[in-house]
Structures are given as C-alpha cells and as structure tokens.
Image (cartoon, rainbow, N blue to C red):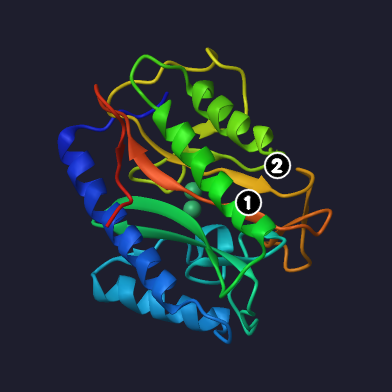
Amino acid sequence: MIPIKNSHEIDAMRKSARLVARSLGLAGSRIRPGLRTVELDEEIADFIYSNDAKPAFKNFNGYPANICVSVNDQIVHGIPGNRVLEEGDIVSVDVGVELEGYFGDSARTFAVGQISNEKQRLLTVTEAALIAGIEQAKEGNRLHDIGHAVQQTAEQAGFSVVRDLVGHGIGRALHEPPEVPNFGNPGSGPRLQKGMVLAIEPMINLGSHEIEVENDRWTIITRDGRPSAHFEHTIVITDRDPEVLTKE
Ligand code: MG
Ligand code: MG
C-alpha cells in the first residue's frame, strides 16, 4: 500500500522539505575548489540541528555521516571526509532531514568552479530528467510514467539511467512504499493518487549504467569510472500539478 497523506501531514512535510532545500542552498554557497567534503557535512549538520531538526541519514542503516557527498564517478552515498574538491569536479550533495517526525529528501549535483562542457551537459540533462519525471507525477497517471519520462530524457541525450537504485515514497519514514524507478514502461504500475508523497531521484551516468560499490561498502561508483549526476526532489501529488516540497 502506498500511504496517502492528509493536509496536516503535508503541511508538516512542507516544513521538513523546506529545511532540506535551504540546506542544499547553503551547500551551493560553500562549494568551491579547496573545500574538504567533511567541512560541508559539519556545516550542514549544524544548520539542521540549529533548526530543531535532525540529519536523517545519520546512522540510517549504520551510515556514518550526516549527508552524502559524491564526487565525479561517485554516484551516491559518498561519505564526507578529507577529500578536497578540485576545480572541474562535479559534486552531488544529498540531504535528508527529520523535523517533527516527518522526513524530507533532496539532492543536487553542483559544479566546482569551471567544468567541462560534457559534465555541464550531464548536469543539465539530469535536472531536466527530474523535471520530466515530476511532470508525470499527477493523479490518474501510473507510477512508471514517471520513470519512463526520466529514462526518455536521459537516453535521448545519450546518457544512461542507473537501475540498481531507485526513488521512494517518504513521510514518517525516510523510505516508504513505493519504489520509484527511473526507467519503465508508460501506463504501468500503481495508479497515482492525490496525497502520495514521493522522492523522485534520477541518477544519470555519462557512460554505462553499471555500478560498483567502493571498499567503504557505502559509496556507489560507476563501473567505467565516468561521471554521474543526481538530482532529487520530494513532491506531493495533488489534483492539479504536483507540488515540489523541497524548494526554498
Ligand atoms: Mg536523497
Ligand atoms: Mg531519496
């Protein structure tokens, strides 16, 4: 069963999601060549705690940091540490927050200084794929209409969709049903209804879709070593256009 949220719950989720968006805004204002990824983790955690909320990823299934910071060929779940961002890197920042019992989740890939045209195109297309997916998240559509739109956008640009990791429902838990793949056949899957809240999160690779896990057992990387991008929003399905909750 896919949980349906009432208007009170959606109000609460607007608050947690907005704090996630503000956290990513803060991340964007700090990212520059020379920044250690752990500095980003600490500053965002401080910001979240100062807003009476908790970083949702901390200790989630044993995850050791507050946020995820994934650089270049790292797709997701990069653990912040002593790595120093360099000019030309792309860095995916994924933030989850728990506020008054409700979760929000959003991610964005940032450019570090000047990046190659190829990397810029990957960022532009991945964000466009997210938006195309969100546009399909409306009452009466089917779940896989979302993934199909993401996949079309990415593959038409010559990129590939990560298949082993998916989006998810979200609410009183960080991960709720359903799984939200970034690929699929249109017109298939459960029917979407007003009040469903989903985290839609395409992970798009410049090369092949295949992944590996690094020795830290968390960081997911591309098998071919080429860059990957990740954009995510928490949205709610309404009887009109979907509402993006993770916006400032
Ligand atoms: Mg996330
Ligand atoms: Mg997520």
Residue nearest the viewer, comparing 54 with 44 = 44
Q: Is residue 193 above or below residue 59?
A: above
In the rendering, at what x and y percent does residue 80 appear?
A: 58, 75
Residue nearest the viewer, comparing 82 with 215 = 82
Q: Is residue 75 above or below residue 199?
A: below
Q: Residue at x 35, y 39 (%)?
A: 235
In the rendering, at what x and y percent does residue 223 appear?
A: 82, 53
Write down the quadrant of residue 237 in the picture.
Answer: top left
Residue 78 horizontal side relative to residue 232, left or right:
right
Residue 193 horizontal side relative to residue 239, left or right:
right
Q: Quadrant of the C terminus?
A: bottom left
Given the image, on which type of amino acid does mark 2 rest? Answer: Phe
Q: Quadrant of the N terminus?
A: top left
Write down the quadrant of residue 219 in the picture.
Answer: bottom right
Q: Which mark is residue 48?
A: none
Q: Residue at x 61, y 60 (%)?
A: 77
Write down the quadrant of residue 55 in the picture.
Answer: bottom left
Q: Which mark is residue 122?
A: 1
Residue nearest the viewer, comparing 87 with 224 = 87
Circles 2 and 1, Cβ within 8 Å, touching? The answer is: yes
- Residue 219 can be seen in this image: yes
Given the image, on which type of amino acid does mark 1 rest? Answer: Leu
* Farthest-out residue, left: 8
